[in-house]
Amino acid sequence: MSGRLTLTHTAFLALVALVTSYISWSAIKASTKLFNLIVVVPVAAIIAILIVTIVASALRGKASDGAMPSRANTLGDILLLGCFAVFCVALTKVGFDIATFIFVWIGIVLGGEKRIWLPPLFSALFTLILVKGFGALFPFPMPMLVF
């Protein structure tokens, strides 16, 4: 099936485009103020760009060989999904900053990073940027432990 999108992938992309369009339309209809659209419009634009990129690359690229992922990869994905569930619960228990720091660190290690100094450094920088960015973007306080 070289250079083609499968029916299920096409249906999924169409569903994502439809939901994104509806949410964008609903937000614009409710209010055209910047405060209302600050998150919706950029995310909708990014989703549209991703959909176009996926369709274009699928139509002109080679089809994958269809190899099944290894058991280790599947277990790693399930472990990361479990860590995400713990992260969601920990957001209100230990705070957004600490939960994010630990989750990103674990995610980097599960991704295969071997250097010992990189996961904590990247986690700290990512957490700082995320916490400060969300703090500037959203008007309500989030539970924090450090920041």
Image (cartoon, rainbow, N blue to C red):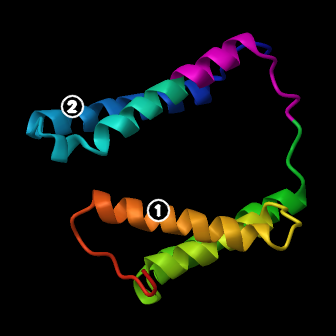
On screen, residue 29 versus residue 106, left or right, reads: left
Q: Secondary structure at mark 2?
A: helix
Q: Is residue 63 magenta?
A: yes
- Counting residues from the start of the chain, the first of labels 2 and 1 encountered is 2
Q: Quadrant of the N terminus?
A: top right
**Label 2, label 1: how far apart the Cα atoms are:** 27 Å
In the image, residue 90 lies at what x, y percent? Answer: 49, 83
Q: Is residue 39 magenta?
A: no
User: Can residue 19 be seen at all in this image of the molecule?
Assistant: no
Q: Nearer the viewer, residue 99 or 82?
A: 99
In the image, residue 147 lies at what x, y percent? Answer: 42, 80
Q: Secondary structure at mark 1?
A: helix
Mark 1 neighbour class, 10 Å CA radius: few under 14, some 14 to 19, many 20 or more: some
Residue numbers of the magenta segment = 52-66
Residue type pointed to by label 2: Trp
Decide: is 58 above or below 101.
above
In the image, residue 125 lies at what x, y percent? Answer: 59, 65
Residue type pointed to by label 1: Leu
Instruction: Quickly name the residue at label 2.
Output: 25
Instruction: Quickly name the residue at label 1.
Output: 130
In the image, residue 118 lies at what x, y percent? Answer: 77, 67
Mark 2 neighbour class, 10 Å CA radius: few under 14, some 14 to 19, many 20 or more: few
Q: Mark 2 vs mark 1: give the one in front.
A: 1
Dominant SS of magenta comes to: helix
Which residue is found at the position 36% from the left and 36% from the top?
42
Q: Nearer the viewer, residue 92 or 138?
A: 138
On screen, residue 67 versus residue 50, left or right, reads: right
Q: Nearer the viewer, residue 40 or 125?
A: 125
